[in-house]
Amino acid sequence: MEKQDGIIMPTPKKVLVVSGKRKTAVARAIIKPGVGKVRINLTPVEIYAPDIAKAKIMEPLLQAGGEVWQQVDMDVKTSGGGYMGQAEAARMAIANGLLKWTKSTHLRTVFSEYDRTMIAGDSRSKETKKFGGAGARSKEQKSYR
């Protein structure tokens, strides 16, 4: 508790909210001081399935090292897209959250040398379907014979 102008104010807690996007998937990570709990949609990352998505999400944590992320708790909520798009969005949110929490240039270089899309993201997404055909570019055939 802090005293300010004779009024007792609670000490402010450091909480970060960071987002990550991939295709149509969006992940929002809430990062606060803690003991190293990482949860994706209220599921601990240790038991998250499928395993390939869990491996993607764990990449920034393994690159950062235990001493960095063991002092924070992360709650990541994902929505939209498929399981792999959600995993990559969560991975981006975790990496950017760790960068903002630590303000470390060394960590930024480690992430960018490993995989730049952890920080910058991947802007590719599905091309929208247009009229006159089945997909984005295909057109219905016609014959004049």
Image (cartoon, rainbow, N blue to C red):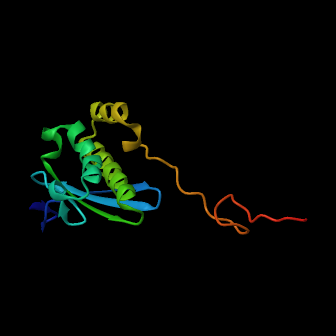
Nearest the viewer among 52 and 120 is 52
How many numbered marks, from 0 up?
Answer: 0
Q: Is residue 93 visible?
A: yes
Q: Is residue 92 left or right of residue 70?
A: right
Q: Residue at x 29, y 58 (%)?
A: 29
In terms of depth relative to the viewer, which is nearer, 75 or 32? Answer: 75
Q: From this viewpoint, which residue is outermost toward the right? A: 145
Does 134 appear above or below 67? below
Q: Is residue 2 left or right of residue 138?
A: left
**Residue 65 picture location, percent across and down:** 17, 37
Residue lying at 52% horizontally and 54% vertically, measured from the top left: 125
Judge by depth and name the residue closer to the eye, 21 or 97: 21
Where does the C terminus fall, quadrant-wise? bottom right
Q: Residue shown at 61%/62% (left/top)? A: 128
Q: In the image shown, does 47 or 141 lie closer to the viewer?
A: 141
Q: Quadrant of residue 44?
A: bottom left
Residue 77 pos. (x, y %): 29, 64
State the image coordinates of residue 83 (x, y, percent, origin top left): 35, 60
Image quarter for residue 26?
bottom left
Above or below, 50 relative to 64 = below
Q: In which quadrant will I find the N terminus? A: bottom left
Q: Quadrant of residue 37?
A: bottom left
| Residue 119 visible in the current orientation | no
Q: Position of residue 97 (x, y in %)?
A: 29, 49
Residue 101 in the image: above or below residue 10:
above
